[in-house]
Image (tube, rainbow, N blue to C red):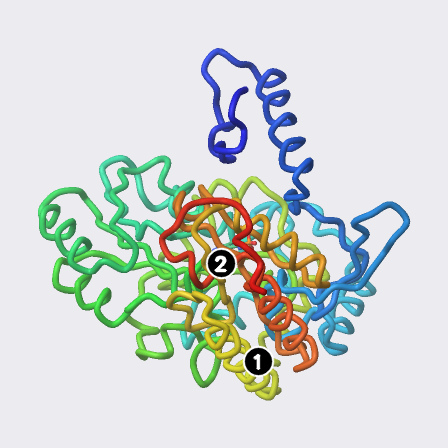
């Protein structure tokens, strides 16, 4: 395949006339091309758990510690002694697996407690737990919406929401564009059986927020339902960590609250919080729920992690000290952090190859962060994505800021606004 440098992951999803082995060969050539430039940093194998620093082995036999900006364990609860103790105690009591799907024997008391805990966290009465956040979104949408319904997505919602839209009619509006959303709602006011608007609370690549008060008002005006996936806002946004719904006190107005247990809540799994009758319906009609085994016993630790958000508010305070210190530091260097208002802080560079080069240089400076390009973001909006944790020390963050100062002096990122061209600028003398 010619000109691999301009290809994106998307180009390999399907290639006309090529079967799986031929596509895999094309893909292997693409990866080899990235590796030859030192730009391949996906699927790095870590040798330590989630934390502010992580052990990586980038060269054979040479294991090193890096400042980690890749974990969504925002409050550091994966390493909290009470969370670990709860997981261990549950394994001692129940063993390691759940053994069956929920309808036929795989529903345990710790699942029931977890459902009550997550519903209560949002001040609501009912919740259903799924095996991942991805499944919570995709399975629930596929269950509730059919072809005669309309799903209206913000263009930046998570991939799992788009998967949920595969079995219904979908329209998308440009990210956070309320006029475009209203236009779709007005045009379709009397069409379709159900209209459901789907937004994230915090957007996973930009770290910006949905203007939820205005979106909920539009849904009311045009008689549409609303779903909010606040995977990245939960435990982070609002005085009590209830996410973007807390900012506007909209807990009762949102029809479907979804999220994940894999970020603040320190384990794995996902949830849908909704009115009890809808939750009961999902329990017996959401195919990925009824035909798949439930979360294993260590998931009992999630209930402990949910409780810790209220019991130990110091971690959220520390997270926000880190966020403002780091964000201000990047802005001070003249870097473009977009509209972030959360613990996800991108450095937006535009050109995917510049993002790849910046990520490589970060590793050289002892910092592990992710380069993000199309299709996760638009083709000219590549960036380095960074997630902060409460556990980062000022020393960690200074190491990253120093690294960015050095990278900026080599790549002149703050002079590149709008420019799409790869290569080093002349070194300043
Ligand atoms: N929603 C959003 C906004 C996400 O960012 C993610 C995962 N990063 C998910 C849902 C899926 O969550 P999980 O990892 O639990 O499948």
Q: From the viewer's perspective, is 139 left or right of 269?
A: left
Q: Earlier in the sequence, mark 1 or mark 2?
A: 2
From the top left corner, tell me how far across and down residue 418 is, in percent: 36, 53
Q: Residue furthest right?
A: 61
Nearest the camera: 189 or 25? 25
Residue 229: x percent and y percent? 41, 60
- Above or below, 312 relative to 128: below
Question: Which residue matches tag 1?
Answer: 322
- Identify the residue shown where x is 60% and y is 27%: 27
Instruction: Name the element at disc 1.
Output: helix
Q: Could you say which is closer to the camera, residue 395 or residue 183?
A: 395
Q: Secondary structure at mark 2?
A: strand
Residue 122: where, in percent of width, then height? Answer: 43, 74
Seen at 62% across and 66% down, the residue is: 406
Task: Give the quarter of the image for residue 68.
Answer: bottom right
**Which residue corresponds to the image point at 71% horizontal and 69% vertical from the top-left?**
51
Q: Position of residue 201 (x, y in %)?
A: 39, 65
Q: Residue 397 occupies which quadrant of the picture?
A: bottom right
Q: Residues within 10 Å of mark 1 (few under 14, many from 20)?
A: many
Query: Is 162 displayed left or right of 93 in the figure?
Result: left
Residue labelled with disc 2: 128
Q: Nearer the viewer, residue 229 or 68?
A: 68
């Amino acid at each position: 395949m010619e000109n691999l440098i301009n290809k994106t992951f998307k180009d390999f999803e399907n290639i006309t006339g090529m079967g799986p082995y031929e596509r895999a060969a094309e893909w292997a050539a693409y990866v080899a091309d990235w590796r030859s430039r030192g730009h391949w940093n996906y699927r790095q194998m870590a040798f330590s758990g989630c934390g502010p620093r992580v052990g990586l082995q980038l060269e054979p036999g040479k294991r090193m510690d890096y400042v980690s900006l890749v974990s969504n364990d925002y409050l550091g609860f994966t390493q909290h002694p009470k969370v670990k103790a709860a997981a261990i105690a549950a394994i001692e009591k129940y063993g390691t697996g759940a053994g069956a799907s929920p309808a036929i024997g795989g529903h345990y008391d710790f699942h029931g407690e977890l459902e009550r805990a997550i519903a209560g966290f949002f001040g609501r009465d009912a919740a259903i737990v799924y095996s991942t956040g991805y499944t919570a979104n995709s399975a629930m949408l596929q269950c509730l919406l059919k072809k005669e319904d309309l799903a209206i997505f913000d263009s930046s919602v998570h991939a799992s929401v788009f998967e949920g839209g595969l079995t219904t009619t979908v329209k998308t509006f440009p990210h956070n564009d309320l006029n475009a959303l209203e236009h779709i709602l007005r045009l379709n006011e009397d069409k379709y059986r159900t209209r459901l608007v789907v937004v994230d609370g915090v957007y996973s690549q930009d770290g910006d927020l949905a203007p939820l008060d205005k979106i909920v008002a539009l849904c009311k005006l045009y008689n549409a339902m609303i779903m909010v996936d606040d995977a990245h806002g939960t435990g982070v946004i609002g005085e009590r960590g209830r996410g973007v719904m807390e900012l506007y006190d909209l807990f009762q107005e949102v029809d479907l609250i979804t999220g994940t247990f894999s970020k603040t809540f320190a384990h794995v799994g996902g949830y849908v919080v909704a009115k009890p009758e809808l939750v009961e319906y999902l329990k017996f009609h959401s195919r990925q729920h009824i035909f798949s085994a439930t979360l294993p016993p260590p998931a009992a630790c999630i209930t402990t992690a949910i409780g810790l958000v209220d019991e130990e508010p110091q971690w959220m305070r520390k997270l926000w000290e880190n966020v403002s210190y780091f964000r201000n530091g990047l802005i001070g260097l003249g870097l473009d952090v977009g509209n972030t208002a959360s613990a996800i802080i991108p450095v937006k560079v535009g050109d995917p190859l510049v993002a790849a080069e910046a990520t490589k240089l970060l590793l050289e400076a002892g910092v592990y962060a992710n380069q993000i390009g199309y299709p996760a973001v638009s083709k000219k909006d590549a960036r380095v994505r960074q997630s902060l944790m409460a556990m980062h020390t000022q020393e960690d963050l200074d190491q990253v800021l120093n690294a960015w100062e050095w990278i900026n002096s080599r790549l002149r990122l703050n002079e590149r606004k709008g420019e799409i061209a790869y290569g080093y600028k002349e070194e300043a003398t």
